[in-house]
Amino acid sequence: MSENRSEIKQLGEFGLIDRIRQNFSLANSSSLTGIGDDAAVIDIGGECLLVTTDMLLEGIHFDLAFTPLHHLGYKAVAANVSDIAAMNGKAEQITVSIALSNRFSIEAVDALYAGIKAACDNYKVDLIGGDTTASASGLVISITALGRAKKEAIAYRTGAQPNDIICVTGDLGAALAGLQVLEREKEVFLANPLMQPDLEKYEYVVGRQLKPEARTDIVFDLADAGVKPTAMIDVSDGLASELFHIATSSNVGIRIYEDKVPIDNSTYETAVEFKLDPITCALNGGEDYELLFTITKSDQEKIKNHPDIHFIGYAHERKSENVLITKQGTIVPLTAQGWDHFK
Ligand code: ADP
Ligand code: MG
């Protein structure tokens, strides 16, 4: 063995992906976009094929102590559909691969696939294949989604221009707030199994953690309004991290306003209860699966009355100057502390 051993956490997840990417180039002219966006883009003649894949591991991405298997199945599909939506495309097929330890019964697999089926029905995608294998420990689920979009409609992370308006859908930070509640209830339950959690007050945030939805509706709404985002990404790792991806890929700087970042009241209240700053939940919480995109100023008028699209800031030409203007008017640098599994 070589003397040199470098820890992966020195690079982090994105550094590691970049390192892998540097050693590969695209040889086929049909490979329009490879590593580096929410989905790969393949020219198949006519429309483009979009491909994305995501792997979820028990103990890393989900905790079965508080995640019902059917919710997990649903969420795994939604996360992939979301990546296709983030390209401004429509998901049409998925493949699902699972690895199971002997802890899992047939009924458990049925429950997982009931969730997968519910998502397939909801998003109108077809399960077309996959792989099944044993696992030494725990459950692994890996889904690949295939989608399509017209070549000229595809929204990459690279297209934001100075003065473009930064938009985000829905509200942010709820999934992280929900996770806090579930983790606390798990501890309470472990200490006293007779305690029944009262989650009613936290219904919204817990729902956002356990059963997120991909914003396929927004892709339709934007097309209806005649708006093509100049850049787009889905919020899976936290707003700050996704803003950095757009800023870096597009070679722009970004400026967002704290008071414009949409945070639901129940997220706000839960965050405060857990002594977390709500804006930090929105910036750094993962798994909201909202869409973050930029539009030209001239398109702003077309979607200004959309109830679920919020204008949170704008792009500018001073790249790497990525800042948040606080409610008090202070300018603070944004830090991209998204979810990084190697930290
Ligand atoms: P997302 O959060 O949108 O799912 P990721 O951060 O997981 O995106 O991945 C970013 C890009 O890196 C994608 O294009 C993805 O396909 C690619 N990627 C991630 N891991 C690997 C890997 N191990 N080998 C090659 N490409 C990878
Ligand atoms: Mg994504």
Image (cartoon, rainbow, N blue to C red):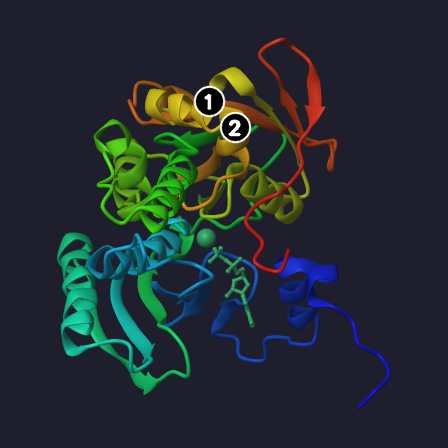
State the image coordinates of residue 82 (x, y, percent, origin top left): 35, 51
State the image coordinates of residue 298 (x, y, percent, origin top left): 46, 24
State the image coordinates of residue 77 (x, y, percent, origin top left): 28, 60
Residue ID for mark 1: 272
Tell me if the residue at label 1 has its CB under 8 Å from ligand 1.
no
Q: Which residue lies furthest to the top in this view?
A: 328
Residue 288, above or below 315: below
State the image coordinates of residue 144 (x, y, percent, origin top left): 35, 69
> What amino acid does circle 1 point to?
Val
In the image, taking residue 332 as reference, residue 246 lies left or right, namely left
Q: Quadrant of residue 255?
A: top right
Quadrant where the C terminus lies?
A: bottom right
> What amino acid does circle 2 point to?
Leu
In the image, taking residue 252 as reference, residue 118 lies left or right, namely left
Residue drawn at (21%, 66%), measured in percent from left and top? Answer: 112
* Residue 81 vs residue 45, the one in the foreground: 81
Residue ID for mark 2: 276
Tell me if the residue at label 2 has its CB under 8 Å from ligand 1.
no
